[in-house]
Image (cartoon, grey):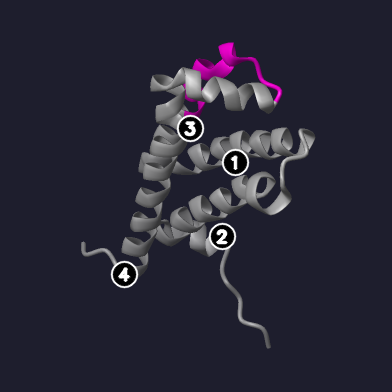
Amino acid sequence: MKASPVVWTGRVLTGLFALFMLGASIYPKFFMPEVVAATMTTSGWTPDKTLLLGIIELACLVLYLIPRTALLGAVLMMGYLGGALATNLRVDNPLFSHTLFSVYLGLFMWGGLWLRNAQLRTIFPIMRAG
């Protein structure tokens, strides 16, 4: 069966989200712990939590990328991103560039899933006013 342009758009968004998370967040936690430690400390986290957070984030991403577990992965990733929001809010980071960045990522992630999953589109349809 040939996938529609909507589904392909969702796949592209999902791929971009996954690449961003891998490159900007997960990879540094595994391979650049000194760099991440400075950020963790200013956010109120001890650097010894870096690897654990990387593992949790990677597990959420893998679940999100597998079609059968994508919904679970999205819910778990949103929980993870909610923790990031709370951390940034607690340390008074700038609102639009830091604190709400996890909301932007969450919308991007859910948008990709919504476009590639017809069942999700029937549960959460876009309704026209009027």
Q: Does dot 3 land on a helix, a strand or a loop?
A: helix
In the figure, is residue 60 to the left or right of 91?
Answer: left
Identified by mark 2, the residue type is Ile
- Give how far apart the Cα atoms at labels 1 and 4 are: 26 Å
Give the residue furthest to the bottom: 130
Using the rendered image of the protein, determine whether residue 74 is visible from the camera's viewpoint: yes
Among the two numbered marks 4 and 3 on one chain, the one whose residue lies closer to the N terminus: 4
What is the three-letter code of the residue carrying label 3?
Cys
Q: Determine contact: label 1, label 4, CB under 8 Å.
A: no
Q: What residue is disc 1 on?
A: 78
In which quadrant of the rendered image does the N terminus lie?
A: bottom left
**Which image quadrant is residue 24 in?**
top left
Q: What element carries label 1?
A: helix
Is tag 2's residue or tag 3's residue first in the polypeptide sequence?
Answer: 3
**Mark 1 Cα within 10 Å, few/some/many (few <14, many 20+)?**
many
Residue position marked by numbered label 3 in the rendering: 60
Task: Please name the amino acid that badge 1 sits on.
Answer: Met
